[in-house]
Image (cartoon, coloured by chain):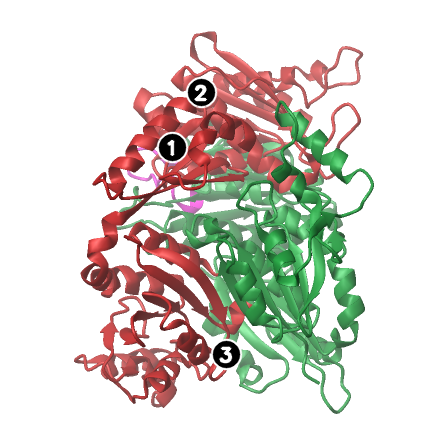
Chain colours: A green, B red
Amino acid sequence: MQPPTAIVVSIGEELLEGRIQDTNATTFAAELLLRGFHVVAMHTVGDGPGELQELLQRLQNTVDVILTTGGLGPTEDDRVRQEVADLLGVELVSVGVDGSVDFLHQVFARFHPGTAPDFFLAQELIPQGATPLANKVGTAWGFHCTLGERAELYVLPGPPRECAATFFDGGVTEDLALRFGHHADQLVHAVLHTTGAAESVIEKPIRDYLRPGENPRIGITASAQGVTLSLLARAEPSGRSAEEILEARIAELEGKLHPFCWGRNSDTLPGVVVAALIDKGQTLALAESCTGGTLAGAITDVSGSSAVFSYGWVTYANQAKVEQLGVDAALMDDSPNAVGAVSKEVALQMAQGARRAAQSDWGIGVTGIAGPGGGSEEKPVGTVYVALAGPDGVEAVRHIRQYARGGRDFIRQKTVRDALDMLRRAMAGIPQVES
Amino acid sequence: MQPPTAIVVSIGEELLEGRIQDTNATTFAAELLLRGFHVVAMHTVGDGPGELQELLQRLQNTVDVILTTGGLGPTEDDRVRQEVADLLGVELVSVGVDGSVDFLHQVFARFHPGTAPDFFLAQELIPQGATPLANKVGTAWGFHCTLGERAELYVLPGPPRECAATFFDGGVTEDLALRFGHHADQLVHAVLHTTGAAESVIEKPIRDYLRPGENPRIGITASAQGVTLSLLARAEPSGRSAEEILEARIAELEGKLHPFCWGRNSDTLPGVVVAALIDKGQTLALAESCTGGTLAGAITDVSGSSAVFSYGWVTYANQAKVEQLGVDAALMDDSPNAVGAVSKEVALQMAQGARRAAQSDWGIGVTGIAGPGGGSEEKPVGTVYVALAGPDGVEAVRHIRQYARGGRDFIRQKTVRDALDMLRRAMAGIPQVES
């Protein structure tokens, strides 16, 4: 049986002008895939009169689900509800929920003098006969209706938080499950995250699984976060479920890629590291030079990280490394034996200094040249040392050589990833990547 | 005169599966806008046989430029060149550039045993009669040809670096200028950045400029970075150039929104703050609790920031605030007069402590509750204090109340923005936002 089809439509001149990166389309394409839909296209259109109506008219008899985002806000060019009503040949009416108009008056009064104008109050209007979709973090209601012969249309607000709230918590997921639930097990999807090896190294031991026609189909993507495998499994006529096929293949992949695999689906590397620290009851301290706080930022981005992380230092200047972390000044001065601030010795003393000052189980020290300035022939831009100091005398230093042409941001991101991966490996007893 | 129209088409199942965020469409929509094109739509399609051909057939007599990205790589599902050749009714032929086949053989040999297969060598094939577009950082050639009555089709590779190299350095920009150059000054675009006021507050004094039909057309976007005004000006029949019209309106906007405006176009708030510090020869130290290093990360993301920033502390635990920054422990203990770690007093002592320890001109202290845990009735999630300590006894504390439902990441991002804005205002002599 073919999976049901879907199209995602993004609405707004700001998208067509390239002012805003459209993350909604990507997010909800992935969510629709997870629910068993085959997303066959994405479209972005402006908010000019008639543009959306024309597109919906063309699409309505070709797909099972159309999900739109944007164009529901409180300004005059937010025309989506009217366009859909015109297409259906109905009027706009109140969502008919108690207090919906009062709420808009209150929100308006918080920021403006005078009475809320009609275009602001229009945020609680939907086409007659449509089902309201609640937006619990914003003011504009979404709605659902059926178009033409078969298309279920879900109209969601554009701000990503509001779009997500309406999708997950406003009735969309339930409605999709009710209408298409029997397809959800035809197609299942999972993502496997790796760090520590290039795409070609990851590919080699699993090449047989990557051939066209294999089930699950596997896609490989390399990014600053590492190499990601995306698996899409279909149920087989033989009766093996998509879930079963997926799990079996994931187990095989994890076996072949063991030292590199650290998580699945929505896992993040900082999240995995924080969870492991919590699990072991251990703590971490950070001393950063070239990453300048982004490593601490990645750790503290994880909710609950305060249980394992209390102290971080950003020591951009040599003097700061000496004063705050007790790094030996002679390593960085003009003397003949000095190794310079970007060296394995300084990285290790930073890690040890942070660990000692914070009285933590683990310390990480990072020093390097993120560029674009500051490089030399001996230590070009992209040269980074990451050191780890841990319990029982554990010590490790990794010398990372990155492409300067990746740019400052890329070098910093990759360094954060490699530092987290060092700690992950040390805690799991996996050998470090050779450098 | 109407500007020429353009459509951007992105090709690839990985986009439709939501595995990859499509940055090409946004980037090249903005580039086309800057060159005077009105981008009327974006489409994303898969790599199934016939899909692209059908789309191009439908579009070819409706727009002036079609720019596609993706589907030119070395695998069997990279079908774009064949689809275009089929649409034109021509064969695929070599680009006809010396050494183009040898180069692909060499690249193949670097990674694989055996002879390069045809689908790999196909990367230097283009439809007969098309003009090759060089891809100086990859293996797949792009190409240009004319479709139907008027559409100039530019076919570019998908990897963003390769796409950019082909667009900027492979012949696309020159060809666009040759064919449409006389339009380039018809439409000019600029962005104005503000921080410190809600969208409705920014809108109020400039409402007359926002009316439909105004030239320049102005779009307003709110994000965690602040409120952004996007201006799109057209030349007028009277002879006033688009540039002239744009600059005049920007001057008016900057006048009316003076305390809030901090930059234009590609400016960033950290970049503006670092530039101001460099300009004044002043230095900054940072003490962060709830932002956990992301403020330091934002500053050090600016190349050259090491000239003004040497010391940062992430003091997540109370003890760390006392030890590292000299915050009075009694403010945070169980005594009746204690105000707690999340308080204006502690924020200020953090700022002062960082400034003192780093011997810097400015110190910023941040303490708050980013959530989702840790909130109380008195201090709910989203409560943040940012303090600034500066030369000549300058001191300021801002109490920020953010929506907990914005989520941890949003709260941290807004806090970073507000902290940078406090310093920007203090340096420019602009009064602080009242809190």
Q: Which residue is mark 3?
A: A204
Instruction: Give the residue at mark 1.
Output: B263
Of badges 2 and 1, nearer the viewer stands 1
Label of residue A161 in the image: none
* Mark pair 2, 1: CA separation: 13 Å
Q: Nearer the viewer, residue A416 or B201?
A: B201
- From where the camera sits, is residue B424 visible? yes
Q: Is residue B314 above or below residue A166?
A: above
Q: Nearer the viewer, mark 1 or mark 3?
A: 1
Are the two marked residues, 2 and 1, in contact with CB atoms closer than 8 angstroms? no
Asked if residue B351 is among those painted magenta in the image, a careful observer would answer: no
Return the residue at label 2: B425
Kindly identify the amino acid type of the residue bearing the numbered disc 1: Gly
User: Disc 2 vs disc 3: which is toward the camera?
Assistant: 2
Q: Which residues are magenta?
A: A331-345
Residues marked 2 and 1, same chain: yes
Mark 3, Cα crowd under 10 Å, few <14 / some 14-19 / many 20+, is: few
Q: Which chain hosts label 3? A: A
Q: Chain of mark 2?
A: B
Q: SS at mark 2?
A: helix
Q: Residue at x 41, y 15 (%)?
A: B429
Are discs 1 and 3 located on one and the same chain?
no
